[in-house]
Amino acid sequence: MNLSLQLAGLSRRCFTAVVLPLALCATLQAQSTAQRKSLPPSAPTPQPSAPRTVLASGTPLDRVVAIVNGDLILDSDVDQERRFETLQPFRDAINYTRSQMIERLINRSLILQQSKLQPEDNISDADVNKELDALRKNNAACKQEGCTTQVQWDKFLAAHGFTAKTFADRWRERMEVLRFIEQRFRMGTRITPEEIKDYYEKTMLPEYAKRHVPAPKLEVLSDRIQEVLLEQRVSSLLGDWLKSLRAQGSVVVLHPGEEAP
């Protein structure tokens, strides 16, 4: 894939992966900068869920896997996050471990808790539906199955364990998280022309030289480099902020066999 096109997708992937450990975002950046070949989208390798307690009647009880300032994260939430991740735009062929999924959910909970302390106008149904319509039209797997109608889209979601409502609710949460990060960390963050030039000369030019292909001029890549550097800055600020929230609050991760306090 063209390196400049990879840059365009990279910044969005890192921004939408804000609830991932920052090390994973750095891995995405390193891989894209290295101009790896595009891989066709593939479903993540199924990984076993933690064992759940079973009642005498045979009904499984949802196990608590983490407690975030009193909010519970359940084993079913981890399963849902894995299924939700497969439908994300700009998704990389990376199979996240169960522990990484739990970290995503913990970070998401911390962000949503803070966003409720700074009330904003509710995200409208129209805005949610607009994004979902774009997702339906651009989701490769859905397009292969002919998702041209709402009925087909609902059937596609059902195959991934979602109803139209549960998926829309989960997407609305995603939009709330991104809006909070946009307003708190991205606004006011500025990348200087010197930083863009430095990245171009020290990162981009060596990569093009390694591939034995002529590098586009700086002005061609400037906007995309600025976006990458901006998302790196936001990721760094967000990571420090999340560490601070964990230190100030109470986050408990429960491993199989442990009971909630």
Image: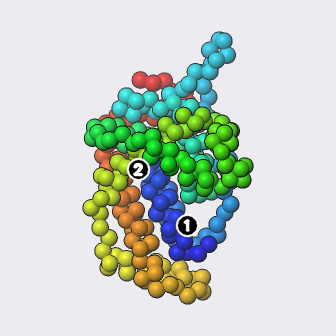
The colour style of the image is: rainbow
Residue 103: image location, x then y, percent? 47, 43
Q: Classify mark 2: helix, strand or loop.
A: helix
Residue 160: image location, x then y, percent? 65, 39
Q: Which residue was labeled with disc 2?
A: 178
Q: Classify mark 1: helix, strand or loop.
A: helix
31 vs 218, left or right, is right
Q: Tell which of 102 and 2 is nearer to you.
A: 2
Classed neighbour count for the residue bearing mark 1: other residues with Cα under 10 Å, few (<14), some (14–19), many (≥20):
some
Residue 205 lies, with reference to residue 50, above or below; the image says below
Q: Tell which of 143 and 174 is nearer to you.
A: 143
Looking at the rendered image, the disc whose residue lies closer to the viewer, 2 or 1, is 2
Choose the circle earlier in sequence order: 2 or 1: 1
Q: Quadrant of the N terminus?
A: bottom right
Residue at 31 percent across and 52 percent down: it is 183
Residue 170: image location, x then y, percent? 50, 39
Residue 190 seen from this side: yes
Residue 246 lies, with reference to residue 16, above or below; the image says above
45 vs 228, left or right, is right
Residue type, numbered disc 2: Leu
Classed neighbour count for the residue bearing mark 2: other residues with Cα under 10 Å, few (<14), some (14–19), many (≥20):
some
Q: Quadrant of the C terminus?
A: top left
Residue 180: image location, x then y, percent? 35, 48
Q: Which residue was labeled with disc 1?
A: 31
Residue 100 seen from this side: no
- Residue furthest out toward the top: 56
Residue at 27 percent across and 41 percent down: it is 118
